[in-house]
Every structure is written in structure tokens, then in C-alpha cells.
Image: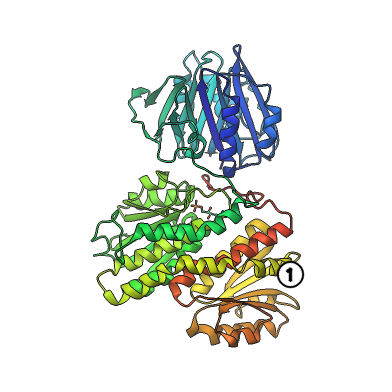
Amino acid sequence: MCGIVGFAAGENVTDDIFAGLLSLEYRGYDSAGIAVIRDGRIECEKVTGRVSKLKEAAKGLFGKVGIGHTRWATHGAATKANAHPHLSYDGRFALVHNGIIENSTELKNELAGLGIEFKSETDSEVIVQLIAKNYLGDPVKALDAAVRRLTGSFAVALICTDFPTSVFAAKKGSPLIAGVGKASAMLASDILALSPHADKICRLEDGELLEMRKNGFGFYKEGKPIEKEFEEIKMKNIKTDKGQFEHFMLKEIFDQPEVAKSIIEKRIKNDEVVFPELDPEIFSDIKHISIIACGSAYNAGIAGKYILKELMRLPVTVSLASEYRYATPLPLEGTLTVFISQSGETADTIAAAERVRFLRGRSVSIVNVKDSTLTRLSDYTLYTEAGPEVAVATTKGYTAQVMTLCLLGIWAKRNERSVLFEATEAIKSIPEIMLRLLGTKDKAEELAKRIRKETSVYFIGRNIDYAVALEASLKLKEISYIHSEAYAAGELKHGSIALIEEGTKVFALSLIPELTDKTISSIREVKTRGACVFAVCREEDGATAEVSDEVIPLPVVHPIVGAVCEVIPFQLLAYFTAKYRGADIDKPRNLAKSVTVE
Ligand code: AGP
């Protein structure tokens, strides 16, 4: 996905647009650009690569209205020609876009047939050419006519030389927020770009358009003016700095004990788990829990599944949102659907939520970013309170998701005193255990040195350990670019063990006492084929240590603590491996923090 920004003010907006793009860069960073209007003409500068490169390129730009963009490429390589903003053939308009236009080829052929020359391979350029073709003097009408022909998702911002004090915008399927500041008006893909300037904000809904000037907004829907409410901004001046850490990811790994503490403070009152957001009877007629998510949020769902099944004695399924959204719909009565998403803007998860809503299913969203799109598509929203997460690879967002799922299971059984006490005590021990697991930093760095040149690294585990192995593997892949797979330890022998050869590095996760012997068997199976096994096991588990080449002993004794905390040594392992390999830890190649396109 991409990040878009727009400003209208009484003074030069170039610096504000640049700063806004910097805070949106986690959304995509293949290229960036800014366009402003000066003396009735559009001035535009674009670069490939990071937003920081734009600072120098755009230093000569001066305008009181402008738009900016940071790109995660979907149509066309990361080149300057494909970078946004895109200009119309007549030089009258400049546009930035976040989303995917699914009928762009058909529209492009139609426009090219009229002699319009395209300068890029992007779907986005089609929009600005369509607007220019439709334009009869009213940019709102031309924008409205153009977006009505689009299928797919878009948040677009547009400037027009005939209206040098306005920015225009339209939204469908991709997020767009308007903001009002002391002396300026602004819009952006998310609140991070608005928080330094805006006092009030207003989220656009699908089908809405706006005209923004420095002293106000006009909103439109279906060609008619509408009123929209602005609300006080909740996340003012969000501090997203790295402090003394070299990377946001390392800071966020070390933030986890504090995040866990804040979750406990919010969720445990007088030794009772509380979820005031929920209808107390929400589980009364539930026979099945269906968790839906993507990526690490999916892995968090898998970890939470084991805990929820244990606590609630209910079938719990976990689905990839990208699969769920196109699967044959099944009746949802008796099902509680739980969506998990750090950003609350992931297109696949949103589409799945719209499907559940259409099928009148009851749903809860577990989300980190306040007021994100997903929160408006579910019946209930549980915020994970992890604070802004800037590194593209999630760490504190993931552990906060697992912790919230565990708390939800305890709350569901709050009338069964036996369950409550032991599980709640386990939750309360998490911050201290996390602090101790951060102490594996040096060991993780040492093992990172040993795997940094590997071409493949495997993670095996059973039950909750398998869930954590999935996240451990994804972390290593997405920031170090080393190929990695996670396997259910018992499944390895059904084919994948053919991959094991002399020196293959295998991490064996084994924190569950009842399964220790079985995991030891799995370790023996790979060792007899030449593998070098690094085991993560309980401090008192001498048996596993004995059969492994290296051991990271963990002070983890309860399944809930394991589900939430066991990943921490692997977050550190991935971090240091990526560091040794000189990879871009906070902004890994090809990735984006929230994938708001299919
Ligand atoms: C996390 O490290 C990944 N960057 C990615 O898998 C992410 O978890 C996934 O895209 C889902 O994002 P969400 O939680 O914002 O929905």
C-alpha cells in the first residue's frame, strides 16, 4: 500500500508534506513525490527509493497547496516515471493514489484511443487522465465522474491549476482522513501524518469526496454536498522516535514488557479480567470461534487458538483472510468471528469483515490502530494498546494480540473460579518473564552470527510451540531475507525432512512438558540426518538439552506465558541476523506495514 498526504495553508506546504510522507513511509517506500501549485502552474518532484531522498529534490518547491505520495509498487516497477504524483496530459492536474484500480487497462485503452499519451505503467495515472478528460470547469464534478467509472480501491488527492487554493480528494476502499489545524487543512492516509498539525479529524467513508481549502472543507456524496462531523484527535503529536535504540524494531521488542503492563492495567481489575467493550452475554450462544487474519496476526491467531480451545472447550478455527474472503460462505449462527489486525487497514481482513457483516455474523476485532477501518466493520473492537508500531515487522503488536486473545478466553470463563486464578496469575507474570527473555539478547546475537550465511533455516514445534515457530520463521524471513519454514514437528517426517542435510540449522521449540519426549524424537530424526539443532526449552528440561547442539533455556512454565512470550528470543534472532546481513531492518525490501491492497 502507499501513503498519501495533502495540505492547504497560507504559507509554503512543502516541508509539511515532506514530514507527513516521512511518517507514512512505513506504508511503502519504493518511490516518493510532491506536487504543489505556484503561479498557476504545477511544480512536481519525484524520486525512487526513500522519502529522505525527496528532501533535496523538493527543496525548491513552493506552494500553498500541495500533495505528496510514498509508494509500494503494485502496477509498474519502482521507477521515477511510475512514482506519484501523476500529471494530466494538459498539465492542469496532479494526483496521488493509494489502492488498486482493477479496470485500469480497459480505461487506459479507451483514453489512449482518444490520443492521450501515458507516461507511466501505473493504474493510478489512468485516474488523473480520466479527470482531465471529464473536466468542464468543476474539479469536484470531474473527480466524481471519474471515480464512478473505477472498480477496485482508491484514496486519491488532486490539485488543479484553476483552483490554486484547493485540494480535492475521493475515497473508496482505502483509508483517508481529513484534519483541521490552526492555520491549515490537511488530509492523509492515516493519523500519524496528521498528528503534529491537526486538532480535529474526520474520516472519509466510501463514496465521499471533498474540497479542502486552508480555512475549511466541503464534503460531497452522490454529487450532493453533505455535512461531516470532526472530532478531537486522540493521538496528538504521536512520538515515534527510536530513543536510544538503533532501529524501531529493537525499540519495539524492548517495549513489550511495558506494553504487557499497560494491557494488564487495562484488563485486570481486582484480579478479574474485564472487557467493558463487550456484551456480557456475547459468548452465551457461541458454539464455534472463527479467527481471521493475515501474516503475523494470523500467527497470533494460531497461538491464541490453543489457549482459547483449552479455556473454552470450543472448536476454534483460524483462517487466512485472503482465503476466507473468496471461500464458499457457511452459515454463521453460533459462530463468533474474531478479526486480528495491527493496522486495522489490511485489505484482505477488511474484505473478510465485510463478508461476515453481510452474512450477519457476530464479530469482534482485535486492533492496535484506533478508529481504523476494521473497527467500523465489527460489532465490537478490542484495542491491543501496543502504541504506534513503526517497524514493518511486527513484534509488540503480535505479542499484544496473543495476550488479548488469552485474556478474552479467561474473561469468557470468568464465572469458573478454578480457571480464572491460575490463568490470571500467568498473565500477570508476563511483563517480568518478558524482561527475562529480553536477557537472551546476547545468545540470540551469537546464534544470529552462526546462521547469518545460511540459505535455509527451519523451525519445528508442537501445539503452541508450532504456533510460535510460525512467527519465528516469518520474522527471520521478512527482515533477513533468509529462506525459512516452520513445521509441526510431527509433520516433518511426512516429506519435508527430505530437505535436511549435513549442517542444516533447525530451531526446535519445546516448552510443553507433556510433549517434550515427542519433540525429542523429532530432534533425533533431524539430527540423524545431519542437522544442527538449536533448542528453546524450559530451564529444567535437561533431556532436550542433551540431544541438542545448542540450548536457549527459557523461564516459561505456563502455556499462556509460552504463547505470548516464547517468540521474544526469535524476534531478537531475526533482528541480529538481519543486522549482520546489512538488511534494512525497519523497512525490509518489498514489504509494507499494512497491505491495503489485495
Ligand atoms: C508482520 O511482521 C508483517 N509485516 C505482516 O505479516 C502483518 O502482520 C500482516 O500484513 C497483517 O497486518 P495487520 O496486522 O496490520 O492486519
Residue beneath the point at 65% across and 21% down: 61
Query: Cβ(mark 1) to ligand 1 < 8 Å?
Result: no
User: Toward which corner of the image does residue 1 lie, by quadrant?
Assistant: top right
Tag 1: Cα neighbours inside 10 Å, few (<14), some, or many (≥20)? few
Please provide percent x and percent y for residue 497: 65, 78
Residue 197 or 154: which is nearer the viewer? 197
Q: Is residue 35 left or right of residue 577?
A: left
Q: Amino acid at mark 1?
A: Arg
Give the answer, above or below, for where 168 lies relative to 318: above
Mark 1 falls on what kind of element?
helix
Q: Is residue 266 left or right of residue 478?
A: left
Residue beneath the point at 38% across and 69% down: 308
Chosen colour scheme:
rainbow
Give the answer, above or below, for where 278 lies relative to 29: below
Query: Is residue 119 in view?
Result: no
Query: Is residue 134 in view?
Result: yes
User: Toward which corner of the image does residue 233 lie, by quadrant?
Assistant: top left
* Number of marks drawn: 1
Give the answer, above or below, for where 389 lies relative to 115: below
Residue 512 or 92: which is nearer the viewer? 512
Task: Report the residue marked by disc 1.
Answer: 450
Residue beneath the point at 31% across and 72% down: 420
Please provide percent x and percent y for residue 33: 64, 31
Please provide percent x and percent y for residue 150: 49, 33
Please provide percent x and percent y for residue 522: 60, 83
Residue 299 or 550: which is nearer the viewer? 550
User: Toward which corner of the image does residue 140 lie, by quadrant?
Assistant: top left
